[in-house]
Image: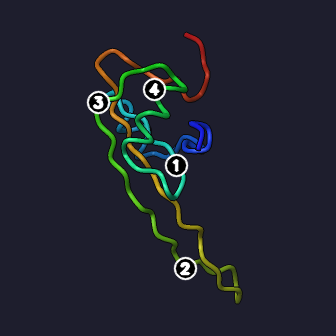
Amino acid sequence: MSARDIIIRPVVTEKSTAISNDGNKVTFVVAKNANKVSVAQAVREIYGLKVEKVNIVNVHSKPKRMGRYVGKTSAYKKAIVTLADGATIDIFGTAD
């Protein structure tokens, strides 16, 4: 499995941007079969940064309704990656 197959996309929510502003943490949606070691290696390979810690959360699906139609959101695996001091990942691609 390549590094691009492990890290699917960054998570951009209020909570994930709040923890990224507080410290040097970045949140990604990762593959279902990814573990902490493979996520750390993928971040190191793609971004070339040192990873200090990886926390993984399984986000379960929730029931949703749209009128009389009932469905579920998709379940996914989320990884919160803590980078070494001074290291940052610019998710939005904006230049200062």
Which one is earlier in the sequence, the residue at label 2 or at label 3? 3
| Spatial CA span between label 2 and label 3 | 35 Å
Q: Which residue is mark 2?
A: 63
Tag shown at residue 30: 1
Say what amino acid the circle numbered 2 marks.
Pro
Q: Tell me the SS state at disc 3.
A: strand
Query: Quadrant of residue 8 in the image?
Result: top right
Which one is earlier in the sequence, the residue at label 1 or at label 4? 1
Tag shown at residue 44: 4
Circles 3 and 4: CB atoms closer than 8 Å? no
Image quarter (top left, top right, bottom left or bottom right) of the C terminus: top right
x, y percent for residue 61: 52, 72
Tag shown at residue 42: none
| Spatial CA span between label 1 and label 3 | 18 Å
Image quarter (top left, top right, bottom left or bottom right) of the N terminus: top right
Which one is earlier in the sequence, the residue at label 3 or at label 4? 4
Answer few, some or many: residues within 10 Å of disc 1's Cα (few below 14, many 20 plus, some between 14 and 19).
Answer: many
Pair 1/4: label in front: 4
Say what amino acid the circle numbered 1 marks.
Val
